Every structure is written in structure tokens, then in C-alpha cells.
Amino acid sequence: MKFNYSKLLGRITEIYGVQSNFARDMKLSERTISLKLNGLRTWKDIEIKRAMELLEIPINEVHLYFFSE
């Protein structure tokens, strides 16, 4: 199943400006973030939790950012 991460990318841009800053705070490489946003790597539960904290995404909206098709 392929998910649409465009809303997540928009939130990253809104909060961080560029993916590299978000990657730094996620403690992941820019390449890894890029692969995840392009659906080539899956998000681990712990990564979703961390991203939600950093991007101030409420738990009741997680599906909008990480599980939209």
C-alpha cells in the first residue's frame, strides 16, 4: 500500500523550512527522510511518534499525515 505524504511534507516545510532541518531533529539522514516521504521506506512507529511531537501534530490527526492514500 502506498501512502500520500504531501500533507506531512507541507507541515515539515511550514515548521522547518527544509527537510534537512527536520532530518537533523529526527536524528535521521536527509536521504532516509526523502526515501520515507517518497514511500520507498516505511515509517517506524517510534519515528511517527517523534515526528508528531516535532511537528506538533495531534494524535487524532495522525492518519491525515501518515496513513492517507
Image: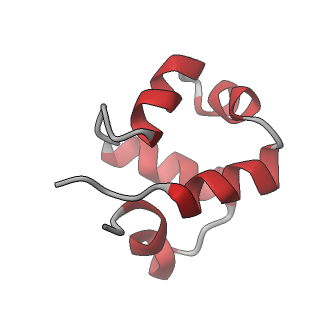
Residue ranking furthest to the left: 1
| Figure check: 66 above or below 61 | above
| Figure check: 23 above or below 44 | above
Q: Residue at x 46, y 23 (%)?
A: 32
- Quadrant placement of the C terminus: bottom left
Say how many tags the image has: 0
Q: Would residue 39 appear left or right of 31 to someone viewing this image?
A: left
Residue ranking furthest to the bottom: 60
The foreground one among 4 and 30 is 4
- Image location (x, y in percent) of residue 41: 30, 32
Q: Would residue 30 appear left or right of 21 to someone viewing this image?
A: left
Q: Would residue 43 appear left or right of 58 to someone viewing this image?
A: left
Q: Residue at x 76, y 30 (%)?
A: 21
- Image location (x, y in percent) of residue 7: 57, 63
- Image location (x, y in percent) of residue 67: 33, 65
Q: Residue at x 69, y 50 (%)?
A: 12
Q: Residue at x 68, y 59 (%)?
A: 11
- Quadrant placement of the N terminus: bottom left
The foreground one among 44 and 1 is 1
Examine the image and state in which quarter residue 38 appears.
top left
Examine the image and state in which quarter residue 26 appears.
top right
- Image location (x, y in percent) of residue 29: 55, 17
